[in-house]
Image: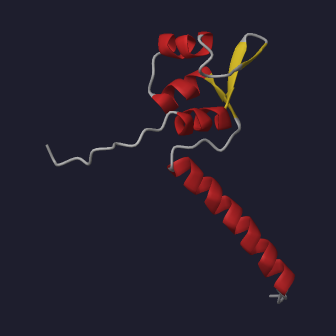
Amino acid sequence: MAAEIITLHDLERFGTELKEEIRKMLSSLNGQPTKKWLKSHEVRKLLDISPGTLQHLRVNGTIPFTKIGGVIYYDHEDIVRLFEKNKRVNKFPDDGI
């Protein structure tokens, strides 16, 4: 059995690759896709909305989209910005009622 020598560079590269894999796994666990462009069915699942609601959001300009060859794509960052833009803070704390 031959011995292998592991260098500091090897360990650093391994650490970098491991961190990237963990980021990808955590991203998918948080419900955030790891890809930039989403298809309609993925956006509907993410937002828990119907096809008609998604079409309405497209038509009224709420959600930007790109159409290529009959397939509609949505930028994940646009969806995140939509959430941030529409975030509301409850001014009255919930009294448990």
- Residue 35, by quadrant, is top right
Q: Position of residue 93 (x, y in %)?
A: 26, 48
Specify the color scheme. secondary structure
The answer to which of 7 and 68 lies nearer the viewer is 68
The answer to which of 49 and 85 lies nearer the viewer is 85
Quadrant containing the N terminus in the rendered view? bottom right
- Residue 5, by quadrant, is bottom right
Q: Position of residue 9 (x, y in %)?
A: 86, 81
Q: Residue furthest left?
A: 97
Left or right: residue 17 compared with residue 25: right
- Residue 6, by quadrant, is bottom right
Left or right: residue 75 compared with residue 57: right
- Relative to 31, say whether 61 is above or below: above
Q: Residue at x 56, y 48 (%)?
A: 28
Q: Position of residue 44 (x, y in %)?
A: 51, 24
- Relative to 78, say whether 67 is above or below: above
- Relative to 74, say whether 2 is above or below: below
Q: Residue at x 46, y 16 (%)?
A: 50
Numbered marks: total: 0
Q: Position of residue 95 (x, y in %)?
A: 17, 49
